[in-house]
């Protein structure tokens, strides 16, 4: 059963400007793993934008918006060995959202030179 769906789209330039101008923005929003991943890419700001959109889409999918006790950098987007993206909840965010107990969190990312977008679907069995 689908318990929630979230979609978000963000301008790559907006994320690039925030990373370049706002000290600490990158570390506040992205995990160390995500930063290493994005920094290794030729078009790194497209990857940052898609991951930012996934975090926003995740909060929409759970239906709470940015929940108390959660942090953007503790909602980590990582890719498996085939490149498929997944969401991993870390630290206090994992504890704060433990009641969520989804059987599966599906995420799809897309980006162009100007836009990053994501869809997140929360699935529970039965």
Image: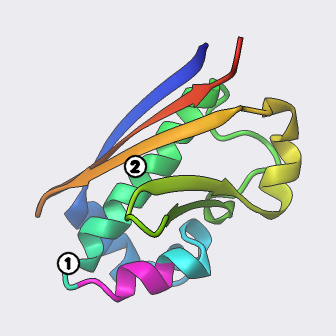
Q: Nearer the viewer, residue 124 or 118?
A: 124
Q: Nearer the viewer, residue 75 or 13?
A: 75
Residue beneath disc 1: 43
Q: What is the spatial separation of the Cα atoms under label 1 and label 2, in whole angstroms? A: 16 Å
Confirm whether the magenta stretch covers residue 39.
yes
Q: Magenta stretch: give its range.
A: 35-41
Residue farthest left in this picture: 113
Q: Residue at x 23, y 62 (%)?
A: 12
Where disc 1 sits, the SS reads loop
Q: Nearer the viewer, residue 113 or 69?
A: 113
Along the polypeptide, which appears first: circle 1 or circle 2?
1
Confirm whether the magenta stretch covers residue 113.
no
In this rendering, the answer to whether 1 lies above or below 71 is above
Indicate the quadrant containing the C terminus: top left, top right, bottom left or bottom right: top right
Q: Answer with left or right where residue 73 lies relative to residue 5.
A: right
Residue beneath disc 2: 53
Give coordinates of residue 21: x percent, y percent.
37, 81
Indicate the quadrant containing the N terminus: top left, top right, bottom left or bottom right: top right
In this rendering, the answer to whether 118 lies above or below 36 is above
């Amino acid at each position: 059963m689908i318990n929630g769906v979230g979609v978000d789209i963000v301008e790559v330039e907006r994320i690039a400007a925030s990373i370049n101008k706002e000290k600490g923005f990158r570390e506040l929003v992205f995990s160390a793993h995500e930063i290493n991943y994005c920094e290794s890419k030729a078009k790194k700001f497209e990857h940052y934008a898609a991951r930012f959109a996934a975090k926003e889409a995740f909060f929409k999918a759970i239906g709470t918006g940015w929940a108390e006790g959660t942090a953007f950098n503790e909602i980590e987007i990582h890719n498996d060995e085939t490149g498929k993206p997944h969401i991993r909840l870390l630290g206090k965010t994992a504890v704060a959202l433990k009641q969520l107990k989804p059987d599966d969190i599906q995420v799809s990312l897309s980006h162009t030179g100007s836009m990053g977008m994501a869809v997140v679907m929360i699935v529970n069995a039965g």
